[in-house]
Amino acid sequence: MSSVRGYRGFANDFLRPNAWRYRDYVIRSFNSDKPYDRFVREQIAGDEITPRPPRTWSPWVF
């Protein structure tokens, strides 16, 4: 893990100040035992899925 932490990218090495939202969404999904197929559908279909409350929008904003 320490080698990943110290990695420096090339031209695409820029800050992602809102990435914590996606990270928290992933953690919440797995902690709530969301079925994996549902999780993947949310990643792929995003905003095409039935409208949901803003708390579940995280995968759609990236």
Image: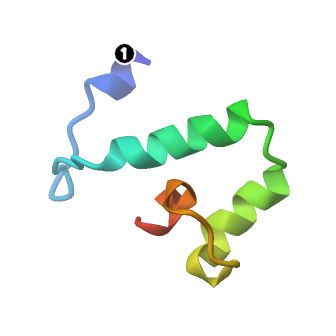
Residue drawn at point x = 20 percent, y = 37 percent: 8
Identify residue for label 1.
2
Residue drawn at point x = 52 percent, y = 54 percent: 55
Residue 12: quadrant of the picture: bottom left
On the image, the x and y values in percent for residue 17 come to 21, 46
Q: Please tell me how crowded label 1 is: few (under 14), some (14-19), or many (20+) other residues with Cα within 10 Å.
A: few
Residue drawn at point x = 79 percent, y = 59 percent: 38
Q: Is residue 18 above or below residue 42?
A: above
Is residue 9 rendered to the left or right of residue 21?
left
Is residue 37 rendered to the left or right of residue 21?
right
Quarter of the picture containing the C terminus is: bottom left
| Residue closest to the far bottom | 48
Which of these two is toward me, 57 or 26? Answer: 57
Colour mapping used in the image:
rainbow
> Could you tell me the amino acid type at mark 1?
Ser
| Residue closest to the far top | 2
Which of these two is toward me, 35 or 53? Answer: 53
Residue drawn at point x = 57 percent, y = 57 percent: 56
Q: Is residue 37 above or below residue 51?
A: above
On the image, the x and y values in percent for residue 5 come to 32, 24
Number of callouts: 1
Q: Secondary structure at mark 1?
A: helix
On the image, the x and y values in percent for residue 1 come to 44, 18
On the image, the x and y values in percent for residue 40 come to 72, 60
Q: Is residue 30 above or below residue 39?
A: above
| Residue closest to the far front | 53
